[in-house]
Each structure stands twice: as C-alpha cells, then as structure tokens.
Image (cartoon, grey):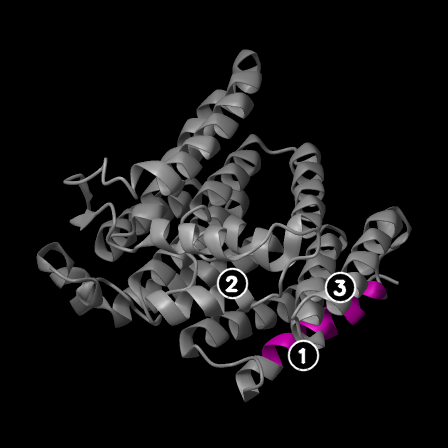
Amino acid sequence: MQFSPKVNTAILSLYILVVISFTVLSVSVTSVVGLMNWGLMLGIMVWLLFQINLRPLFLFLGMTVVYFAIHLLVADTSPLAAGLFFANILLYLCLPYFRVQPEKIAGMLFALMIINALVGIKEILYSPFAGTVSEYFKGFFQNANTNGNFACCTLAAGLLFFKGKKQRFFLICLFVIYLFACKSRNALLFALITMFMYVLLSHRRFVRLAVWGYFLFFAACLLYLIVIEPMNLGEGVKVFGKEAESAGRSTQVLMAIARFPVTCFGVGADVPNDYVAAHTTYAIHNMYVNTFYAMGWGYMLIYAIFVFALYRNLRSVLAKALLMGFHIYFMFEPG
C-alpha cells in the first residue's frame, strides 16, 4: 500500500522538526518533547511498514534483533535505550523505500537555517571579535558546534536535492557564514574532506585512491587522538583560535580505552559516556570509541555492514563524498 509523497513528506518533515526541537531544548527522552520525538519515530516506522516489503532486509534485521536480545542480557542498557538504537536502525533501513519530496524537506531545513541566522544576527556580527566558545554563533542551539552540525546537515540536503543553481549558491554562501561564525573546526574538516573526496570520486581512475586515502586519513585521525594530541605535538597550532587540546578529546578517548574492556556486546549504551563525563564534564567526543565500548564490536560490525551497503548502493558521487565527510566529522563529535 503506497501513500501520497506529499503526505509522507509532511510526516517526515514533522519528525525532523521534533528532532530539532529535542536538540534545541536539550531535554530528556522521558520529557514531553522527548516522548514526541520517539513516538513520532515509531509512528513513522509503522507508517513505513504499510508501504514497503521487508523481505530484502530480513537477514540483516534478524541479525540485528539477535544482537540486541543478547546485548540486553549481558550489558547495562535499559530496554528503552536498546529500543531507541534499534528504532534508528529500522528507520534508516526503511527510508530509501519511503516516497517523499526531498527538495521540500531540504527547503524546510534551509528556511530554518535562514531563520536561525536572523535570530542570531548579533552573534554572527560579533563572531570575528569573539574570544570564548560561549560567544560564538549558537543560534537556536545550546552550543556553536551543534549549530555547525545543523549547518552541515542542511548543506548536504540542499546540495543533494536543490535543483536550482541560485539556491545552491545562496546555501553555500550561508554555510560559509555559519562556518566562520560558529568557528567549528569539525564543520571545516567536513567541508574539506567532502570536497576532496568529491573531486577524486568524480574521476574513475582516482576512485581506488580516494577509498584507500580515506581509510588512511581515518587512521591518521585516530593517531592524532591517541598519540599526537596527548604528547602535545600539535601545541601552538590553532584553528579558529582554538588550540589542539581545547576540547580534551584525546583525554576522553584514552580514558575510555583504559577503563573499559573490548567485548562483542559492549558494557552498556550510556556507561562510557557517563564515566568520562563524570571525570571531565564532557561526553566522549568520538562516535566510534564511544560506540565500540558501549555497544561492542558486534554492533560496530552491524553498522559497518550497513554503511558499506549504503555506499555501494548510492548512485550520486556527491552523496558518497558527503557520507565520507560525515564519518570523518564524527571522529571528533559524540554522534
């Protein structure tokens, strides 16, 4: 049974707005907005199940269900947290079969980006003179890095789905303003990696070089976090006025590595982040390290299979480059 793309677009847009509200308000999953967030996600999945055939996904979903069943038995994870993880996986597996009007969703995000800039115009104008993180452009959000993440997501949606050159041009200009006003090093890294990968992937003879180069750079990021930053080898190097150790990312990563064992099913969804936050006041700013210890290498394997299949099935070179850029981005963000 297939529903109208307009109806599907409206429902998915509502869900995205609730997710943004959940992030802006920074509330718990049991709050009214939190329950709306997850309730809408579950509602969309039920809506999806009426429209798609799950048979092609049966093996992957079966493997995922078995993993979570064992994870709940051996790790310190609540059924709610495990359910949210599984719900996210199911949602993103189903989305490719969900008929929507993506250009309208990208337009909604672009409109929010403009409104956010207008709301934070004073922060944007003052940003060249801002000396502390609290003075950077935050807009609707709690901190400038989250605002930078929002700008990256909107840029990706617009570049993929806007058909007009003028729309893309204005979007890129606004993204550059966000980049320098938020002073997000990770957003800058995302933009540079995406552009570099797009150039390489656009030429057949460089595709293999792009993939191997990407994994090499991925390994270099790990080396930076585990060796270079802890040994102060990058001391004195600043980007957007921030020094290498300004966020304490290597401390968070090394603390998790030293404290938790490597297991197939992990120690618990929130355990590593809670432990590190109790000692440093920050969550682990590395999606991979946090997930590896929290959910185990079994979950990381499932995620790797999902991402590899997604990459193989993407027809757009730009989409592949954006996928690579975001996975480098979350080397330095909680995810």
Q: Is residue 45 magenta?
A: yes
Q: Which residue is mark 1?
A: 39
Q: Position of residue 260 (x, y in %)?
A: 54, 56
Q: Pick out the residue farthest to the right.
A: 55
The three-letter amino acid code for the residue at tag 2 is Pro
Q: Pick out the residue farthest to the left.
A: 129
Residue 131 visible to the viewer: yes
Q: Which residue is mark 3?
A: 4
- Mark nearest the camera among 1 and 3 is 1
Q: Earlier in the sequence, mark 1 or mark 3?
A: 3
Q: Is residue 123 magenta?
A: no
* Tally of numbered discs: 3
Looking at the rendered structure, the secondary structure element under dot 3 is loop
| Tag 1–tag 3 contact (CB < 8 Å) | no
Looking at the rendered structure, the secondary structure element under dot 2 is helix
The residue nearer to you, when weighing 18 against 286, is: 286
